[in-house]
Amino acid sequence: MNRLQLATLLSWAGDAGLQGRKRLQKVVFFLQEAGCPLNCRYTLHNYGPYSRDVADACDEMVAAGLVNEAGGPPSGDMQYTYSLTPVTRQLLHQMPDAQMQAFQERGTALISENLWTLELGSTILFFYLQSGNWEQALNGACEFKKVSSHLQASQGALALARRFEARPAN
Amino acid sequence: MSDKVFRDPLYNYIAFDRQRDGWLIDLVNCREVQRLRRIHQLGVSNFTYPGADHTRFAHSLGVTHLMQMVLDHLMRASPAAKIEGAKQALLATALLHDVGHGPFSHLFEPCLGIKHEKWSIAVVKDESTQVHKVLKKQDAYLPDHVADLIDSKNVKHPAWQRALMSSALDVDRLDYLRRDSLFTGAGYGHFDWHRLLTTIEFYDGETDLVWPVKSAMAVEEYIFARYYMYQNVYFHKTTRGFEQLLQAMWGRANKFRQDGTNVNANPVLEQFWKTDKAEPGKLAVADYLNVEEFTVLEQIQRWTEHPDKPLADVARRFLERDGFAMIEPPPPVNALKTDDLGEWEPELHRLLQSKGYEVPEMYCLADKVELKYLQPYAEEKESKNQSAVNTIRVMVDGKPLAIGQHLPRLAAVIAKAQDRVAYYVPKEIRVEAMQLSKRLRDAAPKAAT
């Protein structure tokens, strides 16, 4: 994921910014699976799919003064919030990313999605990419996250995952 | 029965119990593992550090030794049965994790269009390989288990098994940092590896791994060792320059193959190039493994006689260690588009042509280093996103805490770097290329970064 792509994604979060690094990870994962060419490598972590590429892209833009970072530790349990600086908004205005704009509607919906639904849904989709079977993916992900697959929240997460299945399974 | 013993400069003796681990000795003797004796651990770093001739074979043995040590420790400190069930798979993974490497390790992957991890998995799973046969004879499920552990996307086994092999602090890194330091002579890879291996503990059942706070200093030393090695060895500008020459040659040859020009390929590469994509399933494992460093060097020697002057010239420069000079380009035109350097490349091409270089793209080589390779250790900032895979944590007051938070003084070392682009040009035009870069830099409006 390059700077222009991340700036475009963060612009969809508006002035309030995108809340939480976990949310950012999952939003990028879903968009990528929907065909958005972000080219981030994901592995499965305790909290679902995680990409060092996403974390790096975000931290690098913060270090470069292109993205504002607010919140976070001292306690370590706090979430960070990310938003664009006025200069970055201006640069983005000069150089819009047409490819990313095609995903704006889905990206905006994901940014405001319930965080647990994003976490479990992305984990289900990750398992689906391994097995190619939704039932196995749901059961595997729920076992991994230690929740029941029959809960309404789990079914909601499954529905979200299925909406983002674009690529054939491995 | 005596142990099978290997002398090793890092550990003195690496010993395998012939009775208990005879199958592991059989695995070492497989032709696919023995091939690793002919793959340089550090690619062409020996162009910079003459002592860096160590191989993937010695490294793989070292990783297996460290895996044995850490498993012995965990078996003493935790329910042994949990470890015992995975022990064979973990030892085999340690030995085989690099078995799919091609010539010159990582650096040649873009030339061949391969990912070594995929080929390591293929070698383990392919029924025709000696490695597969030894694993299967030991346990019918072993090939799949080992392949799963090599696959960074695998979800079939507990996270701690993958974390021991591939995480922010794993047995692979513990071996290569010290081994690379020793053989380059750089001398930076010193840290208390023994403490790190023998104090690691499970956290949150069997899902995660952490260290006690008493090991924080050893972790700090390890991070500094990584920092120094990255700065001085892994991204040494001379080494990177020769890597660029190799890639330029291969790029030129690929272009010729596509337009039907004879590249005078040797028989092994001729076979390799018969498939469109060098991926498992499209190219036979045996044909892939046949491509060795001596194959590549022989091919480069052939190219010194090629009628295409730039290909022949770059091949000669590589073999004679007549490298290019590194130049810093001007900053990007828009801070959001770091690959757009404006007029830099066109102007550099014009300069090269004016000096008689008729194919400027062969003499103007961009080296793009991704941020993640420039940073010795990056940790995930939010605790809710942390695991052993992305963050080294120590137990403080009964809770895991990221080492960067526990030791804030590490901030200077783990601070975020920026993607770096450097250009390599013939030494003969170095001064003029630097002047061009300065002129464009001075003319550019001041950007956000």
Image: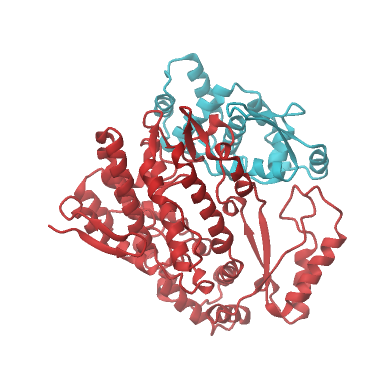
- On the image, which quarter does residue B63 sit in? bottom left
Please determine whether, in this image, residue A40 is positioned above or below residue B281.
Answer: above
Give me the chain that's red.
B
> Which residue is painted at 51% across and 17% down in the image?
A153
> Which residue is painted at 60% across and 47% down in the image?
B414
Query: Is residue B174 left or right of B25 when viewed as pictured?
Result: right
- On the image, which quarter does residue B248 sit in? bottom right
Residue A79 in picture, x, y percent from top left: 63, 27
> Which residue is painted at 62% across and 44% down in the image?
B411
Task: Check the picture and name the quadrant holding the N terminus of chain A.
Answer: top right
Residue B85 in picture, x, y percent from top left: 25, 38
Residue A151 in picture, x, y percent from top left: 46, 15
Between residues B146 and B372, which one lies in front from this camera angle? B372
Please determine whether, in this image, residue A153 is positioned above or below residue B41.
Answer: above
Task: Check the picture and name the quadrant holding the C terminus of chain A.
Answer: top left
Colour given to chain A in the rendered image: cyan
Between residues B348 and B387, which one lies in front from this camera angle? B387
Give the total number of marks visible in the rendering. 0
> Which residue is painted at 61% across and 26% down in the image?
A78
